Amino acid sequence: MNEPSDVTRTPPPLAVPPLPPRTTILRLAAIGGVMLALVAGFALSAGWLTPHRLTQHSFMTAFRVVDGRHPGFRRNHAKGLCVSGWFDGSGQAQVLSTASVLGPRRSRVTGRFALAGGMPFQPDAPGKVRSMALRLRPPDGLEWRMGINDIPVFVARDAREFHDLLLAGRPDPATGKPDPARIGPFLAGHAAVARALALVAARPLTSGFGDDTYNSLDTFRWIDAAGRSVAVRWAMVPLQPVAPSRAGRDGSYLFEDLIVALRQHPLRWRLVVTVAGPGDPTADPTLPWPAGRRQIDAGTLTLDRAESEDDGACTGLTFDPMVLPPGMAASDDPIPAARSAAYMRSFWLRSGEARIPSAVSPAMVATGGGQ
């Protein structure tokens, strides 16, 4: 029998000399150092090593302290209704920004109307802060998201001030209202918050979601084709006739009225962009800009369909204000970045939780608001 050739013969294993003890110790120390750095970074980001540092967890805790625990729901603006439609850009705002969504084209829209606060079963009331959240998707896929509200200014200058306001204004279990012993001293030491809350309280109230104006509150920068940027704020201004607020009714009447209106005809808003003038505040969203600033009609929003969050297209969305197309950017306003971080944490938490049916149910939408 012939011997196997050199091609098929298995070579002997290579002998690897043992590492010197000092080299082994150094390698293990390096690996341990990397692991320790990773753990420390995670602990720092979670706030474990700096308990007084404001984190995403801090906000989630504050919302739970104020409104209770409601698994599966958003930690703020918990009671809501999905809507959909389209946005027709006018092209007029392209002098300010290269964002394709502003061009003379149609973008698909997924949106949500909601009430402020973390209670998904709160009763509707005329004075509740209402929000409109939108995801605009032009044909090129460069989407724009926003969360806008029916108040004239934001109620805090930065994330820390808003966090502390939440805790100072939490309801007293005995009265269901803020405790004067907490909120009084807080407002006395935060004049900007007190001024902003007075503007919010004095705002005109309309009959419902469909005839309300929704403001960006925060400042963003829009960049034109030459690379020039301007500071802007914007509003969705209703094209429906505006009716004064009526006395509140039981349950979810604001949502029921919106469902009925959408079954009867589409609802429309104009996107009105306001350009900052010299000296207008951009970093402080508690301060309004003066009247008479340059405004541009950037297009028309049309909404024609409602869906419950139990089976609607908006349920899995975060309306992160930092999701911006090319041609739009953040300004020195600190609130949008803080909202973005809080939305991310809220989404992560609710995605892993089982939830009970929403107050605004599929049956309510199917029957026209229970009418």
Image: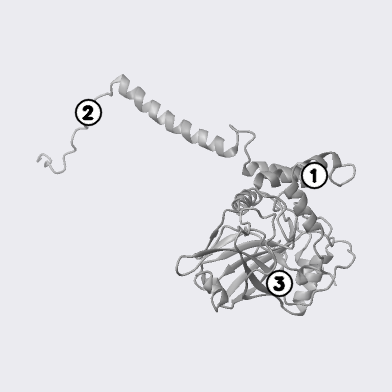
Callout 1: 10 Å neighbours few (<14), some, many (20+)?
A: some
Between 189 and 358, the one lying in front of the other is 189
Amino acid type at circle 1 is Arg
Tags 2 and 3 touching, CB below 8 Å: no
Q: Nearer the viewer, mark 2 or mark 1?
A: 1
Q: Quadrant of residue 215?
A: bottom right
Q: Relative to 182, does residue 252 appear above or below in the rendering?
A: below
Q: For the residue marked with disc 3, what is the amino acid? A: Val
Q: Which mark lies nearer to you, 3 or 1?
A: 3
- Against 277, is 63 above or below? above
* Mark 2 vs mark 3, CA separation in Å: 78 Å
Query: Can you identify the residue that label 3 sits on?
Result: 237
Q: Which residue is mark 2?
A: 15
Q: Residue at x 71, y 65 (%)?
A: 214
Look at the numbered disc 1 and give the secondary structure of its residue.
loop
Q: CA distance from mark 3 to mark 1?
A: 32 Å
Q: Earlier in the sequence, mark 2 or mark 3?
A: 2
Q: Amino acid at mark 2?
A: Ala
Give left or right: position of 11 versus 206.
Answer: left
Element type at mark 3: strand
Sequence order check, earlier mark of 3 and 1: 1
Which residue in the protein does label 1 denote? 170
